[in-house]
Amino acid sequence: MNRYAEIKGKAKQTAALVLSIIMVMALITGCGGPGSSSGSGSRSARSSSSSHPDISGLKYQSSLKLDYAKQFQVYRYQGGYKVISIKQEGSFLVVPKGKSKPKGLSDDITVIRQPLKNVYLAATAAMSLLCDIQGDQAVRMSSIRASEWSFSEPKKRMEKKEMLFAGKYSEPDYELLVKEKSDLALESTMIYHTPEVKNMIEKLHIPVLVDRSSYEDTPLGRMEWIKLYGVLMNRESQAEKFFNKQEEKTRHLKKGVHKTVAFFYISTDGKAVVRRSDDYVPAMIKMAGGTYAYDSVGKTSKSISVPMNMEKFYELTKDADIIVYNGSIDSSVRTLADLKAKDPAIRKLKAVRDGNCWIAGSSMYQRPDQAGDIIVDFNTLIQSKNPSGMRFIQKLK
């Protein structure tokens, strides 16, 4: 196992190491792996006139109804088979327990076999969605430690050793993934900072599904990914019920008071970093009845986070009524004094002078399932004279 130790310490792998790992994996599992996406056919998946993928040997039945999500779609076929199509990621065939992979399946369709039991979760925002449908029991390995979770369910499971730390997304413990017979790696788009890691996991015949929920332009679209996880875990009805309950909370928001909200953090190189104006966080602010301070920023940017110099930041932020600091990225701000110490220009901002400064912690990002409650928090912050009782936003004192 010495070569595994070398793998853990390197981002790039040589061909010799790849071959060695695959050979060891074959000895352990005695087969090509649970999620091999290879097939004997060369026909690519194509869309029929009804836009569903045409899979040889499978009869199409229906599509999953989605109201907000735009980054994925699910197609149902006879026999319980389903195809998940994710923008820029491709297609995934979900094969039910006891069923076989269709003959002639295209090599560019990744196979995911049910039931899932040993998932490696590196898309940490997905954990809350899985917990809500009791699908978290399928997660055996995590890319973060117990102390890094902001809510109790995964924290307790790791403390009980029911869920193991298997290395961060950029440096997973390949040996552990093989030993635990990982049947799926759930990754966020951060994996594309280290594409060689994704390639390595796939070479171990572990299917990799990249969660693009952060690219949804509405908070309810991001939360609707719970339906995708409902498909993976055979808990579609639970996912539908949970989503509907959260959606209902957004139908009873107070309106009338209109305030401008600045949502940002200060990077280590002294720049202000804001969310692109068409991101789901600005959408939450708008749904809550507010105006996003940076509504003209980053519409042509490829990145969700947009850095700017302090001069431009001051011009756009100076008259904002409310500041909500992004504490999920910069945990160094815990008090109003901490915020003021970031840059002299911050002391001059209207919201700072008025003491109307708040912070959103990591729980806001790790709980996309609570989108309805988070929007209610923003609504309370904007509409109330003395906001209180919020779960995800706290006042800086």
Image (spheres, rainbow, N blue to C red):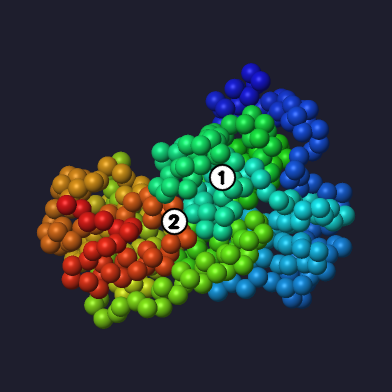
Residue 194 appears in view: no
Disc 2 or 1, which lies upstream in sequence? 1
Q: Indicate which disc residue 34 carries.
A: none
The image shows residue 153 at horizontal and vertical percentages of 47, 48
Q: Position of residue 89 (x, y in %)?
A: 63, 55
Q: Residues within 10 Å of mark 2 (few under 14, many from 20)?
A: many
What residue does disc 1 label?
121
At label 1, which amino acid type do we have? Leu
Residue at 57% of width from left, 69% of height from top? 240
* Cα distance between the residues tagged 2 and 1: 15 Å
Residue at 41% across, 78% down: 251
Q: Secondary structure at mark 2?
A: loop
Depth order, front residue of 18/360: 360
Q: Are marks 2 and 1 in contact (CB under 8 Å)?
A: no
**Structural crowding at the residue carrying mark 1, measured as other residues with C-alpha within 10 Å and reported as few (<14), some (14–19) or many (≥20):** many
Query: In the structure shown, which secondary structural element does the residue marked by tag 1 occupy?
Result: strand
**Residue placed furthest toward the bottom:** 256
Q: In this picture, is 121 found above or below 358?
A: above
Residue 328 position within the rendered picture, expressed as x and y whole percent measured from the top left: 36, 49
**Image height check: is 378 above or below 394?**
below
Foreground pick, 279 / 36 = 36
Under mark 2, the amino acid is Arg
Mark number, residue 367? 2
Q: Is residue 221 left or right of residue 229?
A: left
Query: Does 326 appear above or below 85?
Result: above
Among the 4 quarters of the image, the one containing residue 227: bottom right
Q: Residue at x 37, y 50 (%)?
A: 362
Q: Residue furthest top?
A: 2
Classify residue 4 by image quadrant. Answer: top right
Position of 351 compared to 11: left or right?
A: left
Residue at the (24%, 77%) spot, across then down: 257
- Residue 1: percent from left, percent from top: 66, 20
